[in-house]
Amino acid sequence: MAVIGPHRALATAAPTSPYSHNIDSDIVVVGGGVVGLGLACDLVASGASQAFSSATTSSADGLDWENRVISLTSENLNWLKRIGVYPYLVEHRLRPVNSMRVWDGLSGALLDFDSSDLSDAAGSSSQISVMVEISNLQQAMLQYLEHGPGKDICSIQDSAKVESILAASKTEADSASAEQDPWPVVQLSTGDAIQTRLLVGADGPNSPVRKYAGIGDYGWPYDRRGLVGTLRCRGIEDGEPPVSFTAYQRFLPSGTIAFLPLSDSTGSLVWTLEPEVAAALTLLHRETAGSADEPLAKLIDAAFRLPWSYIERLFERVVQYTKHPTPDNVQRNWSWLDAEIPTAAEWVERGLGEPLPESGTGEVPPKVLSLNAKSVASFPLNLKHADAYIGASLNSSSLLPSGLLAGAMAAVGLAPEGAGQGAGRGRTVLVGDAAHTIHPLAGQGLNLGIADVRSLSRTLRSALGAGADLGSYNALKGYARDRYWENQKMLSAVDHLHWLYAGTPVPLSQQADGGKQQRERDGLVKTAAKEVVGRGVVWARSTGLEVINELGFVKNAFMRQAGSTTTRSSAPWPTSRSFSTTPRRGLHTASRPRALPVSAVFQQIRQHSSHSTGPLASDAYTSPSATSDSAATTSTPSLASLTPSQVRALRDMLRVDHSGEIAANTIYQGQADMFGALGDVKNRDLSKEMWQTEKKHLEVMRALLRQHNVRPSALLPVWSVAGRVLGGVTALLGPRSAMACTEAVESVIGEHYDDQLKELKTILEKEDVHPSLPLLSDIIREFRDDELEHLDTAVEHESQQAAGHALLSAVIAAGCRGAIWVASRV
């Protein structure tokens, strides 16, 4: 557990308890794994790597490789370098992965990934990922925290266990203030009780922090176990090539089997198996480890080379053999299994099928000699996703329209069961496995956790720069918005990929018994139906693999999505856009966090048209007193003064903005009409107030289209209907859901206007700029501020407490971004 911030003795804030020593801290991170330690490192990082060599310099240290490894993406590796942790790694125990070979175990359809293609396409990466042991990462992070820039800021409670987490008792001062969320108090086995402004749960799938926060989760078991082990390969002395820099993965009906390179002679195994098969293979290893010919090593070779029908038969025999009872102190004789696994030559001699692939060709990994005796283990595979990442209150009645959203979305599989029901405790946030658990077939589990860490750290630094309370929802909401939908997409994609292979009926000809048992069990009609489905799915997925394998740009997109592209930035801490202007409440100067240095603080001054006392840029088109014959409002820039790309950008800009204002108008109109029909006068008037601002925006945008001779989007009827429906439906679900819709829409619009201002800035830097362009820039800045004022209004009216807020916001925001992309082209 990491404690970050000033350590002060508590006076009255902690609850009465038998614990003797009370500590006050800014941030407490529960969980000492890579994710928890990584967050602590990121929060205290100076942003500059330290120049020194790793403590261990020998390339042959004699230490066994551990079975807990990660295929660390280039993006996350660069993060380690940026914050200064990388120099503490034992570098010779890192293994780059430059290529991947993935194929279908039934059809042989192939997908090859190569980092050289990615480098040519993106110019930013020379490897797909790097294999690194978890222990290597942990020791590097611990050394960094002990000797790096945060040694006086962060303390590690490595010998303490969390016994309980309580909410601090409120003092009279707390009750008198607007502060609603009590500080969490973490009570340790050492007798300490640490009260913290923000409690971070990096404490795994069964997270005590998540339970304290009142956050539920959803998901399902896969009825599979992951078998891991460290492989010693045969090598040149046995006529085998050394381990290369290629990762191999074969999709079998039982699950995937993956070979990941660790060194020239060592690899790591991750094998997805049915529980009884995993148990049988674990027993097989325990009873034969260290023998001259380890049967499990040969079985692994077979899983990469033999057809599924033969592998399935081997599994059945191994499982049945382990079920036979044996006399006490008498071990099973596994010698029969060696004879059951044919060599490549025996396979051809017996006429069992096409020649088996040889590792010398690079089609399959090198053959395995043995497995490290203590490295073989298995663990259950599950999918889990927390209902929310932030422990804000999500109170709602399931009998009210606002409480029905979670149930409705859960019914169609779009939201977790129970989302938004019950109460959550604030000042808590989840990262890594505490927030999500994923199938290991894509190697993204820990990488997603590190991405959470990077996002949360950026969010906290942004909040600190704005002087916000680090534990408040407004300070943390950007993290949930950034990560929930991204993680959901990856969890869903990997989940569907697993079931596409493990949940598809195997064609009869590729079953161990030719389908005899299936015909007896299911009958002819059902068997025939399964055969049609099985053959169809295998053909479709194999065709898809082959097509994608020919499309280099698609493969590169997959690699970039998985984090194989490096992200360069001149500043160690990219500035996140923060739009909220909600005033800080209950934050005292004496208790502001001092642990997180920020190099610069940026403040945004807004000019809201709804309460402005001076002239506005948009008045040039709407005010009767405006000069109607001004060149800024009546003429357009000549084509000679703009490049073709700038002309296209200007036209797309106006077309998109006009479409966006149409949609915004109809959203607020739909909300106002629905609230009026429900008799909710207060929220009807609030919607009308925001609608009035959007009406002015639309009037100006229509004038701009006419002035610049830009055609509107051909899909204006679609945007109008979609906006009306979205506004009406979210209002029907309740005021909080309507405000969540406003928050999501205005966030996207605010970001989009920011992007447009950046585009216009490059045009305005030219000489002899047409007067309409500076005016347009001022209008967009004014409209952006109006939209962000609406966002703040939504937050103040409890948008984050809507049922299923994280998922609802993410879906609406994704739809808005898609609409922007379409409107710019159609």
Image (cartoon, helix red, strand yellow):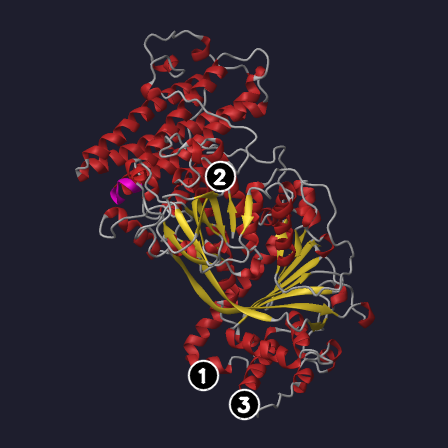
Tell me, yes or no, whether the two marked residues, 2 and 1, touch with CB atoms within 8 Å.
Answer: no
Q: Residue at x 27, y 51 (%)?
A: 404
Q: Earlier in the sequence, mark 3 or mark 2?
A: 3
Q: Up-down: is 734 above or below 574?
A: below
Mark 3 or mark 1: which is in front? 3
- Mark 3–mark 2 Cα distance, whole angstroms, equals 58 Å
Question: Is 211 left, or right, of 447 in this rendering?
Answer: left
Helix or strand or loop: what does disc 2 sit on? Answer: helix
Mark 3 or mark 2: which is in front? 2
Q: Earlier in the sequence, mark 3 or mark 1?
A: 3
Give the residue at mark 2: 459
Give the residue at mark 1: 520
Q: Nearer the viewer, residue 656 or 281?
A: 281
Q: Up-down: is 80 above or below 569?
A: below
Q: Residue at x 41, y 44 (%)?
A: 10
Mark 2 or mark 1: which is in front? 2
Report the span colored magenta.
Answer: 732-737
Question: Is 630 left, or right, of 595 in this rendering?
Answer: left
